[in-house]
Image (cartoon, coloured by chain):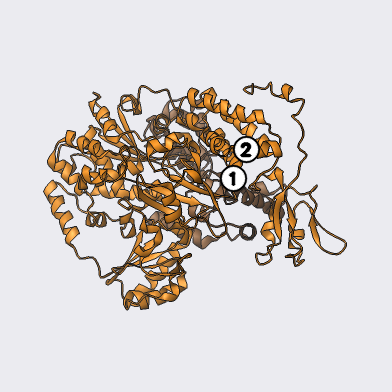
Amino acid sequence: MNSILKPKEKIKQLLRNYPRERNHLINFLHLVQAEFGYLPEEVVESLSEHFSVSPAEIFGVATFYASFRIDRPAEHEIQVCQGTACHVRGAEAILEEFSRELQKKFGVEEWPNKVSLKKVNCLGCCAIGPVAMVDGEVVSKITPARVKEIVRRLAQGQSNKNEKENFAQGIKQN
Amino acid sequence: MKKFISLNQLQTYVQSCLDRRQPERIISLSAASCGRASGALKIASAFERYLEEFKLSDKIKLKLTGCHGFCQLEPDIIIFPEGYFYASLKPEQVPEILEKTVVEGKFLDEFALVYPGSGKNIRRVLELPLYQKQLRWLLDVHLDLDPLSLDDYFAHGGFSALLKVLMDGSQEKVIDLVTASGLRGRGGAGFPTGLKWRLARKTESQEKYLICNGDEGDPGAYMDRGLLESNPFSVVEGMIIGGYATGARKGFIYIRQEYPLAVARMEAARQSCYQAGLLGEKILGTEFSFDLEIIRGAGAFVSGEETALIASVEGRRAFPRQRPPFPVVSGLFGQPTVINNVETWANVPLIIRQGPEWFSQVGTTTSKGTKIFSLVGQVKFTGLVEVPLGISISEVVQEIGGGAPKGRKIKAVQTGGPSGGCLPVSMFNLPLDYEALQAAGTIMGSGGMIVLDDSTCLVDLALYFLRFAASESCGKCAPCRLGTAQMVDILERITRGEGQLADLEQLNKLGRVMQKGSLCGLGRTAANPVLSGLRYFREEFERHVLEKQCPALVCRKLITYAIDREKCRRCYLCLKNCPFGAIKKEPDGWPYVDEELCQSCGLCLNTCPKEFGAVFKKPRYREVSEERPMDDENNQGPGRK
């Protein structure tokens, strides 16, 4: 989504000088996803040529791993952790509450276009669960009341931007 | 950082770092992922602002360290040299702490952490009861090590192990040391590390590889994240030593992409080591060269299995393959490959520096050294803890973890994640030892330790793990692909109150087939949560089956909610919030739950204000029917007979 170029051209540009060994494939898929937020279908053909493997292989890898998505993402993303520690603290109820609140705030039909609600296996923040990652930011100790608050914020278009930037900046600095 | 071109030059420099006087005062802020999620960076910028404003920056150093291990009360700071400790900090507390504690050296009792139980104020970090029974060989430096500074790593004795190895020159001797220490793989399987290295060294080949397995996929475990984020250089040093000993010229560190901070810090560490000449061609002027690459995973639990990990590093789908040949003979790109877990690599420099006798003094006959566990779940204090092997489970849960939260009762502990099992309280005297745990039906695993109390239903937990295994099964072999799906099916039936006694036998049978017939570790261990559940908690399974009851009141189809009139204040919050219209008003105004409509979502319980606490769970009485007559027909499905 950062890109103004069409997927095909952008991928071509990214592939320039990129190593042709097969073991760099997954990393390249990460690059493309960081660029577009998902893997556009053009990726299959271009990469098949570049790495000299069949398109089916590329598609196979892109769909095997849970981190890659081949559909265009919604505006916001909520990943609710379903790790064991979160599970025993009620993560499933949190997921349901998100789904209900999103339906309420964005409409039963429309919400999947605005927010993508996903499960994630474990975010590794087990001591402060239940947790969820909301637009890349870890939110800890979630209760149904906080779910309402988070969804309300998303609906108002203010996704805790400061904290998010801090976190991203912190990672960049490191 | 300048580039070191000889061993002597590095040695002199390391010595100067060790001798260098530390700044008078250090404020060490825990800023790993947990800390950041709890607002550590806001605390950091508050400190920076005030240090700047009062021109204290050159006297007082703020260090953003990794994980201090007390993950539940993040963000926390430790003020050195006294070791004063404040937890759950808020930015508005910063100026006062800076003025009184950092500048004047007075501890502020009003901000002190009060330890529940003793009611005592915790003033210094080492007074924390959580730390008392631990043996923090690996974790101790996390308290004041700047994970981004190579100098700071030198000042903590870093790279002296590599110097020792390179000065001595004998590769065999390194392997002898590691073998003598008794170090075993910390990823779960517990293969002797020295033996693995020796096998790889013996295999003739032009190219050899090392892989660091940081694909920490067990839900509920974060030991490796803790190490990678807090002390990345120790993993790099361990791998360089491993490369030297085995003859490998290239290493890969594979990290889950769900850990962005760990990836960033490892990448930073790698680059500093290249700049300092600790990685690359002719390291420190010797003939030894070693390259290191960092690979981000892409979200697949099975890629933690070593042959699947190799496939993933090669850029393919993470499918495991038949062993033998083992990776030490034919691994990455068909070449001999040593794969060790993050914690195993981090132990290597310690063993070289302190000697194998020092390492093996701790532990049991077969399990030596320490092990990091992520102690989480229904326990008073959760966090990253490091204990000597051989310590009993109850010491970890009761003494380090502080036992059950108020008013609760501990029921079991789950180790080893989806590959492990649950042990009941009656087994808590068991020592943490690879063989002892295996005999009891669970595994040491990579270190997840999840404490379960009486509010956890073991059937539901078994279902949770099997669902996880079913969705993460790569599908290559039938016992795992079909077995996990069948188990999920049966367990779902049981949690719905539709199970029967024969289902329990079916689960046992399926589990044994999966253990024997699956291709890789994922499938072979996937049934453990169910099998250990049936072994130790059969009664709980039977109550679901025979009485259609969930004793822990978890399985949704078997429970409903009710409102206690004694406590209810008729605020009607539950009524307004019920998504199913299941809460109604009696003619006299009291709300009640219509069990026909109730879907047991539990929102009423959560919305009822804490101070009232009027909503409670209760069993949903179902008619216990005789064995369903149609079952014989139903049971004809694949794998069920």
- Mark closer to the observer (2, 1): 2
Tally of numbered tags: 2
Residue under pointer 1: A118
Element type at mark 2: helix
Q: Colour in which chain A is shown?
A: brown
Identify the mark at residue B540; answer none if there is no mark.
Answer: none
Tell me where residue B16 sits by quadrant.
Answer: bottom left
Q: Residues within 10 Å of mark 1 (few under 14, many from 20)?
A: some
> Of the residues shown, which amino acid type is indicated by label 2?
Phe
Nearer to the camera, B409 or B334: B409
Residue B435, image x and y in percent?
A: 38, 35
What residue appears at the point 23 percent right and 37 percent down from the top-left corner?
Answer: B180
Residue under pointer 2: B541
Q: Verify CB contact (< 8 Å) between mark 2 and mark 1.
A: no
Tell me where residue B616 sits by quadrant.
Answer: bottom right
Q: Which chain is orange?
A: B
